[in-house]
Amino acid sequence: MTKSNDRSKSKWMRINLTISQIINFAIEIVKTAAIMLIIAFAIKNFLIQTFVIEGVSMEPNFHDNEYLLVDKISYRFSAPKRGDVIVFNPTDSPDSYIKRIIGLPGETVKIVNNKIYVDGYKLDEPYLPDAINTNTSSQSLESKIYVLQDNEYFVIGDNRQNSKDSRVIGAVNFSQFEGRVFVIFYPFNHLRLI
């Protein structure tokens, strides 16, 4: 063989090797992207989801356009507790709601003179500032009694005068829960654990 044939053959081997490397690199990128998509899908559908607040029903603790992280797994291992802030999907709306759990399955919730009683005891609400107006609604729902069945929860907005909650839509079944709010992550100056 001549030197020019050797150089030509060597050049083609380098080009073939380079094309092979590019193809292998592209295959690795596609595999990595597919794995990342599968992981992201699993996280969003089974572990954590984001939620954006629209409205003022949870003020003063949560504000319009805040971004939250919702834990979708903890209620598979432990029961919801009074005071938990949840995201749920009401039967009468395509939108999800954010509210606070006030009443648990088997309890009786009664609203009298703008005060909430659970099984006859006035509800202590340390998450509400003392100065907040806790009028339960601009609607006529005074002295109403709600008896919760198995898997039913009474949920209410912290901003009682501007909240469409169990006083209007009724008890929320556990099957409607999307998860428990555990972090406000945006805007960054509002960042906190719940």
Image (spheres, grey):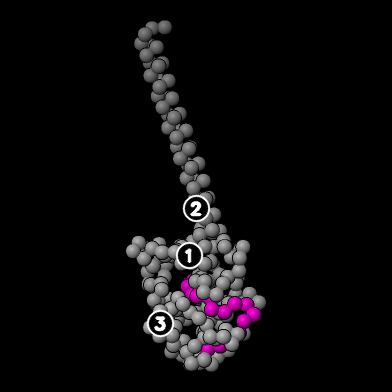
Which residue type does callout 2 highlight? Ala
* Percent coordinates x, y for residue 88 in the rendering: 52, 71
Q: Residue at x 41, y 27 (%)?
A: 18
Secondary element at image label 3: loop
Q: Whole-Å distance between the Cαs marked 1 and 3?
A: 24 Å
Q: Are marks 2 and 3 in contact (CB under 8 Å)?
A: no
Which is more toward the observer, 75 or 89?
75
Mark 2 closeness class: few <14, some 14–19, many ≥20 residues within 10 Å: some
Q: Residue at x 60, y 85 (%)?
A: 119
Q: Are marks 1 and 2 in contact (CB under 8 Å)?
A: no
User: Magenta residues?
Assistant: 95-111
Based on the picture, tell me whether residue 109 belongs to the magenta stretch. yes
Give the label, 1 or 2, closer to the camera.
Answer: 1
Give the label, 1 or 3, closer to the camera.
Answer: 3
Q: Which residue is disc 1 drawn over?
A: 182
* Percent coordinates x, y for residue 168 in the rendering: 51, 84
Kindly identify which numbered label has been placed on residue 40.
2
